[in-house]
Amino acid sequence: MTDIKITVLMPCYNAGDYIAEAIDSVLTQTFPDFELLVVNDGSSDKTANVIRSFHDKRIVLIEQEQQGIAAALNNGLQYARADYIARFDADDICFPERLEKQYQFMLANPACIVAGSGADYIDHNGQYVFTHYPAAKTNAEIRALPFDTCPFIHASVMYKKDIVTATGYNIHAHSFEDHLLWQQLRTKGEMFNMAEQLLRVRLNPGSITIDERKRPEAFHRIKMKALQSGSISSQDGDKLRCLIDEQNNAATKQGAYYSLLAKKFLWNNYNPARARQHMKTAIALNDFDITDYLLFGASYLPKNIIANLYSLFAAR
């Protein structure tokens, strides 16, 4: 392969149940000149076997011991052969024209260093949950966002490799390595969000991340400090890692997953019956979270009152 214009960079960890569908969605893109660079971050399930079951010269597999997503991305960037990087996650699904549309957008906007998009969110079974529309699309709108608002869905972005490689993902910014990167790149060039949805993002109870509203206050203090300053120390990174590890159990992650589904069916895709169904599951898994009970009660309120409550809840 000598004419690679895009490297699709896909880190993965124990994604064996979903990664075949993710790979298929890349291999069937309308844009042909890409490589799919998969960084297997020490998976202990069938992930590696699934990847090797594909016989396509565009797939490049890198194996590493488990080091986390930031280290996997930095490692992948060193091997990437294209000037443009399309980020993608191993449990998501690209729409067929994603690469073509983002590549043409980048060429038409040479000052752009990062371009994201909207996305349709699905549950772990692939069922539609809601559509995310970017709150900020133009460079000016993105720059006007408060520092604690992440401007991009990480798996949706395409960016210029040299700009990102010069900065790199901070391995201490556990679970918000992308958000910190965007803060660090604000002075490096222009950023945009394409309004349309270019992928499906899977909400997955087995994911290494959970709804951050479920994180303890100490986590948020460290994160806000890092985003405001544009850096994070290894000491704060170690504290984050400990806080995340304390919640890295099936009950907490599944409870956060069903709570998040309930909120999306209440706020973003109004279906109070489905919201209550998921909230009951969340409460059964984590019966100590008062927020889940409050949201369950709110689901019986009229739609206009729920919308007003969402405005207050989202601003917190």
Image: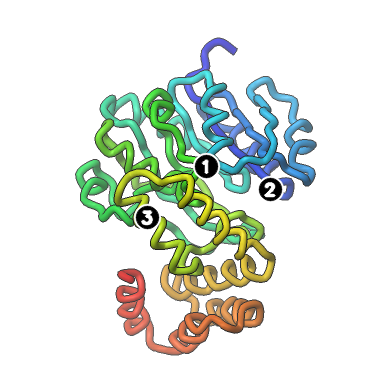
Q: Is residue 198 visible?
A: no
The quarter of the displayed image where residue 305 is located = bottom left
**Where is residue 30 shown, x and y percent of the image?**
52, 30
Residue at (62% x, 65% y) in the render: 253
The amino acid sitting under disc 1 is Phe
The amino acid sitting under disc 3 is Tyr
Quadrant showing the C terminus: bottom left
| Figure label count | 3
Asked if residue 65 lies left or right of residue 214, the reply is: right
Quadrant showing the N terminus: top right
Q: Nearer the viewer, mark 1 or mark 2?
A: 2
**Where is residue 46 shown, x and y percent of the image?**
79, 43
Q: Which residue is mark 3?
A: 133
The disc label shown at residue 18, or none: 2
Disc 3 element: loop
Disc 1 element: loop
> In the rendered view, how is the structure colored?
rainbow
Q: Earlier in the sequence, mark 1 or mark 2?
A: 2
**Where is residue 163 shown, x and y percent of the image?**
37, 27
**Where is residue 157 shown, x and y percent of the image?**
43, 39
The disc label shown at residue 95, or none: 1
Q: Give the Cα separation between the discs numbered 3 and 2.
A: 24 Å
Q: Within 10 Å of the Cα at label 2, are there few (<14), some (14-19), or many (20+) other Cα atoms?
A: many
Compared with residue 254, is residue 80 higher up or lower down, i.e. above or below? above
